[in-house]
Image (cartoon, grey):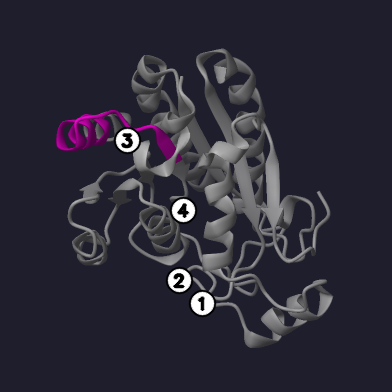
Amino acid sequence: MTHSKHTFDNQLVLVTGGARGLGEHLVRAFLREGARVVINYFKSSDAAAALAAEAPERALAVQADVRDKAAVEKLFAEAQAHFGMPITTVVNNALPAFSFNGDARPHADQLSWENMNQQLDGIVRGSLNTTQAALAGMRELGFGRIINVGTNLFQNPVVPYHDYTAAKAALLSLTRTMSQDLGPDGITVNMVSGGLLRTTDASAATPEAVFDFIAGATPLRRVTTPAEFADAALFFASPWARSVTGQNLVVDGGLVKN
């Protein structure tokens, strides 16, 4: 595999949940660096179409529920047919319906297995589906990049979102075990973990006082933005990370030391 194959202009990047929130910033970051990008969306068709229209030669919006294995396989086939190459890089960002509202979260005594399953289904099953759908194309190229979006909440559960955090912790485990399994194929698997981001659709319910509290406790004295997070995610897809796999990079202004 030549060094040039690692560069962004040779990559076809899938961003799940790419139409809005953090996903939109991830899409924009990869487009800015010259990659081709598949913007996966579940319900946000207008936002996905508008984003794709900003770079019509290099972006394609494709609807799929990442929990649905057949739908994900269809997305991969559609992307390959459109761009004439397999997806090389998968960013597992899609988030099942969830609001970062500490007051509305299920507390310890109300937490149901349905709450847990809903998050596991979206976060872990979704990422497993995309990873498995990517393997044939990545193996054919001898190159692949899987980037999972995590959270710093399992190191610092400042708000105990039990269901969301458990699913992300399972995804960290899958990041490590998949990196072990797929390394011989030239496929790296890493995680980028943010804290509270200022601001995404998911964190819109967070009170200003919480943002201010987090900022005050953070070494950089501010809450990380989605654009800053997206820039850090680029590292794992870049040539500079070609020998990095199975890692979890925390991007939160230094709040959590990993």
User: Residue sitting at 69 percent across and 47 percent down?
Assistant: 249
- As drawn, is 189 to the left or to the right of 88? right
- As drawn, is 248 to the left or to the right of 35? right
Label 2 to label 4: alpha-carbon separation? 11 Å
* Contact? badges 1 and 2 (CB < 8 Å): yes
Mark whose residue sits in front, 2 or 3:
2
Disc sitting over residue 75 in the figure: none
Label 4 to label 3: alpha-carbon separation? 14 Å
Instruction: Give the mark, 4 or 3, whose residue is nearer the N terminus.
Output: 3
Percent coordinates x, y for residue 18 in the rendering: 36, 55
Q: Residue 12, can we see it?
A: no
* Contact? badges 1 and 4 (CB < 8 Å): no
Percent coordinates x, y for residue 159 in the rendering: 72, 65
- Amino acid bearing label 1: Ala
Instruction: Give the mark, 1 or 4, whose residue is nearer the N terminus.
Output: 4
The residue identified by callout 1 is: 204
Say few, some or many: other residues with alpha carbon within 10 Å of mark 1 (under 14 / 14 to 19 / 20 or more).
Answer: some
- Amino acid bearing label 3: Asp
Say few, some or many: other residues with alpha carbon within 10 Å of mark 2 (under 14 / 14 to 19 / 20 or more).
Answer: some
Label 2 to label 3: alpha-carbon separation? 23 Å
Which range is magenta?
Answer: 75-90
Instruction: Give the mark, 3 or 1, whose residue is nearer the N terminus.
Output: 3
The residue identified by callout 3 is: 68
Percent coordinates x, y for residue 228 in the rendering: 58, 65
* Contact? badges 4 and 3 (CB < 8 Å): no
- Amino acid bearing label 4: Leu
Circle 4 SS class: loop
Which residue lies most toward the top here?
Answer: 184
